[in-house]
């Protein structure tokens, strides 16, 4: 079956249903109920969602399927009708810088909505709880999934850009860094050698990618550094850095560099293998 035989309305229905958090297995069952044959349904879903056919076949057999992101490619990607420009691209590790992922108005509104709820930022402990960590000296807060219309719109934009359902994302975190504050080098994936690995991954599997969006431009400092590959991404209002990783991927080591002058506001979205249960 070629791509042009898939009706536009069917393609859009599959995409929107997938982004809402519907599993591949349920999606295939709905297509079957609508009269599509099993092999035909699997072929259609694989093509529309840009997934390996083997992944869709596994879902049809009710196996646990881990979703992987679609890495943005340049120069311009449309995400839920919003143009995003890919300006830097590396493949080991996978890193993309994304210009115009947020508008200036969206940046200002996120800061305004988050400001009254800021508290000392925490990290995820090995047992899945949150803890104060000396490596992270910022203030922050979390939005619930879809908590406000603005948050829901941004989450859908990210889902569209990466071809991963909204339900696979953790809640959007807003962080505020003042002069001298930083987040020392670390990994976003969870270490399977830690005793709490099973607990922290029980709610959605391993983390597979991160999107760090810059809500303002610091006067000096505050970029995101990838020391293993010698790359530093400058913090620029409305832009973002996206990076993907596998468990144990040491090349994805990164740091939020100290703010030398001014302040830094960011919004971070972590993505999981499976639907995330907050």
Image (cartoon, rainbow, N blue to C red):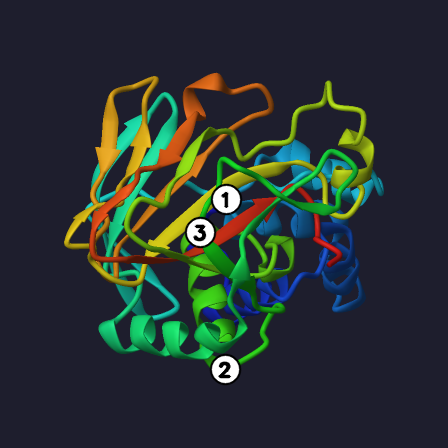
Which badge, 1 or 3, is on the more N-terminal residue?
Answer: 1
| Vertical placement of residue 56 versus 45, above or below | above
> 205 or 28: which is nearer to us?
205
> 226 or 11: which is nearer to us?
226
Q: What residue would you read off at disc 3?
A: 138
Which residue is at a point 48% across and 42% down the rendered structure image? 136
Counting other residues with Cα less than 10 Å from the Cα at mark 2, is it few (<14), some (14-19), or many (20 or more)? few
**Does any portion of residue 70 appear in the rendered image?**
yes
The answer to which image quadrant residue 217 occupies is: bottom left
Measure how far apart labels 2 and 1 are at the Cα level: 28 Å
Percent of width and height locating residue 263:
27, 57
Of the numbered discs in the image, which one, if any, rests on residue 149?
2
Please tell me whether mark 2 or mark 1 is closer to you in this view.
Answer: 2
Q: What residue would you read off at disc 1?
A: 50
| Vertical placement of residue 190 versus 274, above or below | above
**Does any portion of residue 64 appear in the rendered image?**
no
| Vertical placement of residue 69 versus 229, above or below | below
Percent of width and height locating residue 197:
76, 30
Check if mark 2's residue and mark 1's residue have beta carbons within 8 Å: no
Check if mark 1's residue and mark 3's residue have beta carbons within 8 Å: no
Which residue is at a point 68% across and 38% down the rendered structure image? 66
Measure how far apart labels 3 and 2 are at the Cα level: 26 Å
Which badge, 3 or 2, is on the more N-terminal residue?
Answer: 3
Give the structural element (helix, strand or loop) at label 3. Answer: loop
């Amino acid at each position: 079956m070629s791509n042009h035989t898939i009706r536009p309305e069917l393609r859009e229905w599959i995409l929107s249903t997938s982004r809402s958090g519907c599993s591949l297995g349920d999606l295939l069952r709905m297509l079957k109920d609508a009269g599509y044959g099993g092999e035909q349904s699997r072929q259609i879903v694989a093509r529309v969602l840009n997934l390996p056919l083997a992944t869709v076949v596994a879902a049809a057999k009710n196996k646990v399927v881990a979703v992987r992101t679609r890495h943005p490619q340049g120069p311009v990607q449309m995400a839920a009708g919003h143009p995003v420009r890919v300006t830097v691209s590396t493949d080991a590790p996978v890193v993309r810088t994304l210009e115009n992922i947020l508008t200036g108005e969206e940046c200002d509104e996120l800061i305004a909505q988050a400001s009254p709820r800021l508290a000392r930022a925490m990290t995820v402990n090995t047992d899945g709880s949150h803890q104060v960590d000396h490596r992270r000296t910022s203030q922050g807060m979390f939005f619930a999934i879809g908590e406000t219309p603005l948050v829901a719109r941004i989450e859908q934009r990210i889902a569209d850009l990466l071809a991963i359902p909204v339900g696979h994302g953790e809640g959007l975190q807003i962080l505020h860094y003042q002069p001298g504050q930083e987040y020392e080098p670390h990994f976003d994936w969870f270490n399977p050698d830690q005793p709490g690995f099973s607990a922290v991954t029980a709610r959605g599997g391993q983390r597979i990618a991160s999107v760090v969006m810059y809500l303002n431009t610091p006067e000096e400092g505050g970029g995101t550094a990838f020391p293993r590959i010698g790359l530093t991404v400058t913090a620029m209002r409305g832009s973002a850095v996206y990076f993907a990783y596998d468990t144990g991927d040491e090349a994805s080591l990164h740091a939020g560099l100290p703010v030398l002058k001014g302040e830094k506001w960011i919004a971070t979205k972590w993505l999981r293998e499976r639907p995330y249960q907050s």
